[in-house]
Image (cartoon, rainbow, N blue to C red):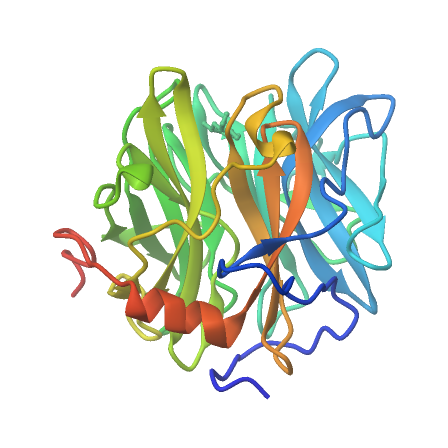
Amino acid sequence: MPKVKIFGESIPNMPWEDKPADCTEVTWRHSKNPIIKRNPTQKCSRVFNSALVPYGDEFIGVFRADHRDGIPQIHVGYSKNGLDWDIENEEVRWVDENGKPYQPEYAYDPRVVKMQGEEDYYIMWCTGFGGPTIGMGKTKDFKTFTRLENAFIPFNRNGVLFPRKINGNYVLLSRPSDTGHTPFGDIFLSESPDMVYWGKHRRVMSKGGGWWQGTKIGAGPIPIETSEGWLMIYHGVCNTCNGFVYSTGAALLDLDKPSKVLYRCKDFILTPEEPYETTGFVDNVVFPCAALCDADTGRIAMYCGAADTYVSVAYAQMDELVDYIKSNSELLHGDGFEFR
Ligand code: BMA
């Protein structure tokens, strides 16, 4: 049993490999990465920045797939082991709450969560709405998909819902941005009683500190609830002569007031190193959008987009990761600054 209690489900069939004996890092990569390669279906030329949930005793994924015209849409995929995926060639077809077709102009970087106490799985993505912002939808069966109101007006990205209501409200992390390859950005939090009206905005965490996260940061997988706080895995970006570099970081947020940062690891926990991360459509990108965590063993499998071209998996152990975050923590001015 892990020392850190995980308030989540048992996922005995999740992907896992033990840490290699010579590994000195807090995370390690799946030995057969990338698990999704180029051209996985006729229509999809590149699949990356994607998410999944356990579904029965298998897994269902929502994939960001860039089509041959370069425009991204969300595709559903199925897997028995979380590693070998059967991705549908046709994109998700959304309808509004009256059943009328309501297809996003483009859709990228989806996250998916089973909301505690509800039958619905919520999907969030970056949607075209006269500029990028947070699209929101739900499904019970991954066959019919209903769009909800967009959470925000443009420009915003990286919308990530917590897996349960907190103090009676839905809680959404997001990263206000601009219309292009945004050169700034902090993680904010907003609350809603009904998934329609969002308010009580708070700034959770600001960019800065270590240079790897000096340009912008954005939430990644659905936060994982533990006895030490919400584990928030996120991406941090630095700017270089050759463009942005996307690494992965981790922090712990207060369980009742998640706008309050308890610990924030000053160092990245994953950064582009392997060829599939350093070379692709966009070089030097590791972009986590989902994490499976087995409550019984503390095993974590992070699903990352790699170089805007592939999907890869990296592993961590909850106890070790929490220790690492706490013993390398450095809060910045602005972290939880506006929490009340
Ligand atoms: C961001 C998003 C991500 C992408 C990243 C690196 O702005 O568009 O989808 O992975 O840039 O290109």
The answer to whether residue 295 is above or below residue 275 is below
Q: Which residue is rendered at x = 77% and y = 42% of the image?
A: 76
Q: Which residue is rendered at x = 42% and y = 59% of the image?
A: 232
Q: Position of residue 309 (x, y in %)?
A: 66, 27
Q: Which quarter of the figure has residue 236?
A: top left
Q: Which quarter of the figure has residue 184?
A: top left
The answer to whether residue 81 is above or below residue 147 is below
201 or 15: nearer the viewer: 15
Q: Is residue 56 visible from the viewing direction of this image?
A: yes
Q: Quadrant of the N terminus?
A: bottom right
28 or 113: nearer the viewer: 28
- Residue at the far front in the pictured view: 22
51 or 209: nearer the viewer: 209
The answer to whether residue 91 is above or below residue 9 is above
Q: Which residue is rendered at x = 75% and y = 34% of the image?
A: 93
Decide if residue 87 is on the left or right side of residue 264: right
Q: Quadrant of the C terminus?
A: bottom left
Q: Position of residue 206 (x, y in %)?
A: 23, 46
Decide if residue 220 is on the left or right side of residue 87: left
Q: Which quarter of the figure has residue 238?
A: top left
- Residue at the far top in the pictured view: 69
Q: Position of residue 104 (x, y in %)?
A: 61, 27
Q: Is residue 165 visible from the viewing direction of this image?
A: no
How many marks overall? 0
